[in-house]
Image: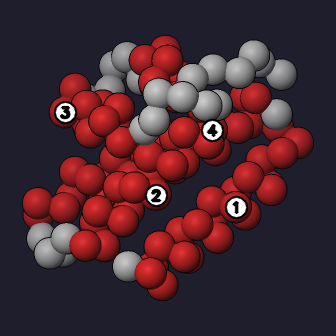
Amino acid sequence: MLPRMRPIRWLEEHLADAPPELLEVMAAAVPDAGDAPEGLAAGAMALFEQVLRGTGGREDALALLAADALLTHALEAQAELDPDAVAGFAARCLSGLQQETVDG
């Protein structure tokens, strides 16, 4: 199990080679407080909400890509932090996604 890390620091350490424009959108969406898994998931949910409010056109593509990447990385960060808790964390993320689609 690795020590807890803030979301922005996790992104910087794990995604240094990511396309700058994508990384910028991802970093802007995550809070710079709390643990990486929760912060990355929160950023993903914020971007998914933005996409749901969008037009469905090309202008939403980068936000959708960033949201997908953040959710994937949230699961990766949780696996690094506590592999035994990934299933529960994934279930909470799925519940949040389902709520976004209902509310959105």
Label 4, on which residue?
A: 37
Residue type pointed to by label 1: Arg
Query: From the viewer's perspective, is 6 left or right of 29?
Result: right
Q: Position of residue 60 (x, y in %)?
A: 19, 61
Q: Earlier in the sequence, mark 4 or mark 3?
A: 3
Residue shown at the point (48%, 84%) measured from the top left? 102
Inter-mark Cα distance, 3 to 2:
19 Å
Inter-mark Cα distance, 2 to 1:
12 Å
Label 3, on which residue?
A: 21
Residue type pointed to by label 4: Pro
The relative height of residue 58 versus residue 6 in the rendered view (above or below) is below
Is label 2 in contact with label 1 (beta carbons under 8 Å)? no
Label 2, on which residue?
A: 45
Give the total number of marks visible in the rendering: 4
- Quarter of the image for residue 4 reads top right
Q: Earlier in the sequence, mark 3 or mark 2?
A: 3
Q: Nearer the viewer, mark 3 or mark 2?
A: 2
Q: Residues within 10 Å of mark 3 (few under 14, many from 20)?
A: few
Q: Nearer the viewer, mark 1 or mark 3?
A: 1
Label 1, on which residue?
A: 92
Q: Position of residue 71 (x, y in %)?
A: 52, 50
Q: Residue furthest front?
A: 33
Q: Residues within 10 Å of mark 4 (few under 14, many from 20)?
A: many
Q: Position of residue 9 (x, y in %)?
A: 49, 18
Inter-mark Cα distance, 1 to 3:
28 Å
Q: Secondary structure at mark 3?
A: helix
Q: Earlier in the sequence, mark 1 or mark 3?
A: 3
Q: Residues within 10 Å of mark 1 (few under 14, many from 20)?
A: few
Inter-mark Cα distance, 4 to 3:
22 Å
Query: From the viewer's perspective, is 96 left or right of 44?
Result: right
